[in-house]
Image (spheres, rainbow, N blue to C red):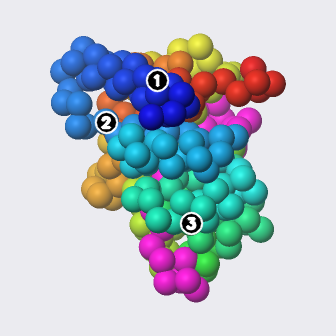
Amino acid sequence: MTDRKDQLAANLAKVEARIAAACAAAGRRRDEVTLIVVTKTYPAGDVRMLSELDVRHVAENRDQDAAPKAAECTDLPLTWHFVGQLQTNKVRSVVGYADLVQSVDRSKLVTALSKEAVRVGREVGCLLQVALDAGESGRGERGGVAPGGIAELADLVADAPGLRLDGLMTVAPLTGEYAGRQQAAFERLMDLSTDLRRAHPAANMVSAGMSADLEQAVAAGATHVRVGSAVLGVRAGLG
């Protein structure tokens, strides 16, 4: 085993222990939470090692980095998540490899994703990115639909050919009433998920929490956590 693979294995074990402890503290089963490793800025070789270490879900946030990486890893049993803000001119490329897009936040994007998914004969899972710093309307600083826009956007996705409404995603906001209050933010997302599932019972994914706040996300009820630096390390120059 290479030094890098040893490092990844050790980091994965630490993250696994954190998730297991958070599940135990919340009275949840460990299998209720799926780890997604965010591999942005790291090479395809790392993705391959992660796959050998039984990681099955990976995420990327920039198509120009993700597309060639995914192309190098088509032989691996991976589910690819796209988690970054997505411009419509990148949709054709992203639909080529992403199994789920977690950053759906506007009707124009739904239309573009649906058109491309139908064209290539794929079904793409969609999570609505919720902006908890946007009040009830408008958009967040880092993208996302305001809570008041979830129902309408969810109906659009559910009715769009080639798309599957899977649930909600958020990033803990840096501004607004939830700034510095990650658990409260994630609990709000869970309430919004409960509302969504009344109309769309199958949309039960809740993606929340990253390296610094995965425990709060698990405590709130998240089904998926997105962990990058705690597994892969902090790349020099990124801070």
Q: Residue furthest right?
A: 237
Residue depicted at x 49% and y 83%: 121
SS label for mark 3 = loop
Above/below status of 169 relative to 94: above
Between marks 1 and 3 in the image, the one whose residue lies nearer the viewer = 1
Q: Choose between 145 and 234: the one closer to the eye.
A: 234
Residue 11: assigned label: 1
Coordinates of residue 150 in the picture (x, y in percent): 51, 50
x then y, percent, for residue 136: 59, 38
Tell me the distance, in whole angstroms, between the alpha carbons under discs 1 and 3: 27 Å
Residue located 72% across and 53% down the image: 65
Q: Quadrant of residue 115?
A: bottom right
Q: Is residue 68 left or right of residue 15?
A: right
**Residue 109 can be seen in this image:** no
Instruction: Name the mark nearer the viewer: 3 or 2.
Output: 3
Precedes in sequence: disc 1 or disc 3: 1
Give the mark, 1 or 2, whose residue is nearer the N terminus. 1
Can residue 123 be spotted in the picture? yes
Please state which amino acid type lies under the numbered disc 2: Val
- Residue at the far front: name it: 1
Position of residue 88 in the picture relative to residue 81 (left or right)? right
